[in-house]
């Protein structure tokens, strides 16, 4: 856990790609669930944020 947080603060690719991937996965789950309208409403924005974040952090150093 300490290495993960340290990587976030040092702007390393691995931890930030993991955060972006979790955002993308959360957005897809929010899109496909049938229970909460607020989750469906925000799903596109969450997925888009994760995708743009992944594109940006793919340029970070290892």
Image (cartoon, grey):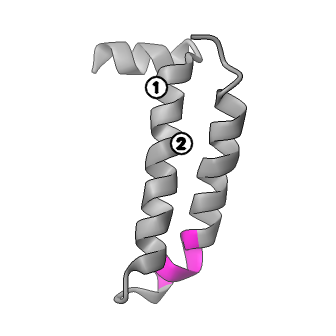
Q: Main secondary structure of the magenta part?
A: helix
Mark 1 packing: few (<14 Cα in 10 Å), some, or many (20+)? many
State which quarter of the image contains the N terminus: top left
Q: Position of residue 27 (x, y in %)?
A: 50, 64
Instruction: Tell me which residue sits at (48%, 76%) in the image.
Output: 31
For label 2, the residue is 20
The disc, 1 or 2, on the residue closer to the chain's N-terminal end is 1
Q: Position of residue 51 (x, y in %)?
A: 64, 49
- Specify the segment rendered in magenta: 38-43
Instruction: Tell me which residue sits at (50%, 81%) in the image.
Output: 40
The quadrant holding residue 42 is: bottom right
Q: Secondary structure at mark 1?
A: helix
State which quarter of the image contains the C terminus: top right
Mark 2 packing: few (<14 Cα in 10 Å), some, or many (20+)? many
Q: Position of residue 12 (x, y in %)?
A: 55, 16
Q: Is residue 11 positioned above or below 47 on the image?
A: above
For label 1, the residue is 15
Instruction: Tell me which residue sits at (47%, 39%) in the image.
Output: 19
- In the image, is 13 to the left or to the right of 19? right
The quadrant holding residue 44 is: bottom right
Q: Is residue 39 positioned above or below 58 on the image?
A: below
């Amino acid at each position: 856990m300490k290495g993960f947080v340290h990587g976030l603060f040092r702007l390393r690719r691995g931890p930030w790609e993991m955060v972006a991937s979790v955002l993308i996965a959360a957005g897809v789950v929010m899109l496909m669930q049938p229970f909460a309208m607020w989750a469906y409403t925000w799903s596109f924005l969450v997925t888009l944020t994760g995708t743009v974040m992944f594109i940006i952090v793919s340029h970070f150093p290892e």
